[in-house]
Every structure is written in structure tokens, then in C-alpha cells.
Image: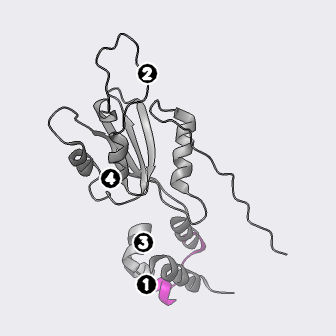
Amino acid sequence: MADRSSVFSYLVDTYYEGNTSKVAEATGYTKKQIDEWRSGKRQPQKDTLEYFIHCIFTPEFKVIVEYGEFRQGQGEHVLTQLKVLLKGHEERSGIYAFYDSMGNLLYIGKATKLLQEAYAAINREVHVRFPAGVKTKPEKRHEIIRYVSAYDVGTSNWIDYPKHVESLILRISKPVLNKNIGSLEKAYIAPQES
């Protein structure tokens, strides 16, 4: 049976390419602690190892921007505003959401590249019907959106976690600009060994 330091070292090498700086950033432990656990100078506690495994395998929500103001009609270009709101996360995957002036969720989407896909979604036509008395109907989504949120929801090797999160939110909130409600995957049950 392997000692906890060997397991810890294996996980660092396999999931963080041996980079202790990445491990420290992801877990909150110091590089010195990590180096001592990897070398076997000290054994990580059982709870420490379990927490470390949790950090590796449990997708976690991280806020990129929440209710970032989107100022349509004030001379700022749509793409420029999105770049500012998503700064540093433009090429990341995640979930984005659009809200009206009262903070009501209008649309939610999953993206493999946040900037590119949020920009395409915010420029789509508004497909909902407006009451007959509304004389000036918005044509594009960016005309009615006032706030933008974006989240890094993590990934998993066994399930499309961002898609799963998006589908769950769609089912619960039913935003008016989303045409479908997504699909939820059933819980995975590991096969039994014989």
C-alpha cells in the first residue's frame, strides 16, 4: 500500500504537471508544505489528501463578472464592452448570462470560448413577440440587455459539466430568449469489478 506522500506526489505530477505553484494557487497550501509532502519529509494528513483530491476532481464555480453593466446606446461597441467585462477570460470556457434593466434573466449560454460565443449570442435577433401596442420593438438582443454575468464552472473528464449546469439553470428559470431547455445527464454509476 502506498504512503500518502506517494499518492500526493502522483496527483501533483499527473494533474498539475509537477508545478507546485499551480498546486499552491489551486489549494491554498504553501509551496513549502507541498514540497515537503511530495518529498516524503512530511506525510500529508488524510483530510489534507482528501481536500487535495476534492480540488482536482470537483468542478467549482468562479465568478468572472456578475451583473456587469452593459451600456447600450452610449457609444460603446458591443465587442469592446464584452472584452472589458470578460478581461483575462475571453478564451476560457464557461457560462454567461444576460439580464434586463431590472435584473431579470433573459438568456443563459454555455461557451467553449466566452468572448466569441457571448458576442454571437448578444447580437442575435430577438425572437419573442411583443404586445401590439409596442411601437419600437428591439431587433437585436443587445438592445434590451443591461447586465452581463459570466462564470467559470470548471470541467470534468466524465461529464460535460458546463452543459449540465446550463441545462439545470434553463430548467429552473426558463429565460425568455432561450429556445430550448437543454438536457440533463443521468448520474454516472461506476461499473462493478468482478
- Residue 129 disc label: 2
Q: Which tag, 2 or 3, sits closer to the chain's start?
A: 3
Camera sees residue 41: no
> Residue tagged by mark 3?
29
The residues tagged by marks 2 and 1 sit, at their Cα atoms, a distance apart of: 61 Å
**C-alpha span from label 2 to label 4:** 28 Å
| Label located before the other in sequence (4 or 3) | 3
Q: Nearer the viewer, mark 4 or mark 1?
A: 4
- Image vertical order of residue 27 relative to residue 66, above or below: below
Mark 1: which amino acid?
Answer: Asp
The mark lying in front, picked from 2 and 3, is 2
Write down the residue under mark 1: 35
Give the amino acid type for the residue marked by disc 3 in the picture. Answer: Tyr
- In this rendering, is residue 42 above or below 114? below
Check the image and report above or below for 28 versus 90. Answer: below
Q: Residues within 10 Å of mark 4 (few under 14, many from 20)?
A: many
Q: Which mark is residue 115?
A: 4
User: Which image quarter is the N terminus in?
Assistant: bottom right
At x 23%, y 50%, the residue is 84
Mark 2 or mark 4, which has the lower sequence index? 4
Label 4 vs 1, first from the N-terminus: 1
Q: CA distance from mark 1 to mark 3?
A: 10 Å
Which residue is the extreme one toward the top? 133
Numbered label tally: 4
Which is more N-terminal, label 1 or label 2? 1
Label 2 vs label 3: CA separation? Answer: 54 Å
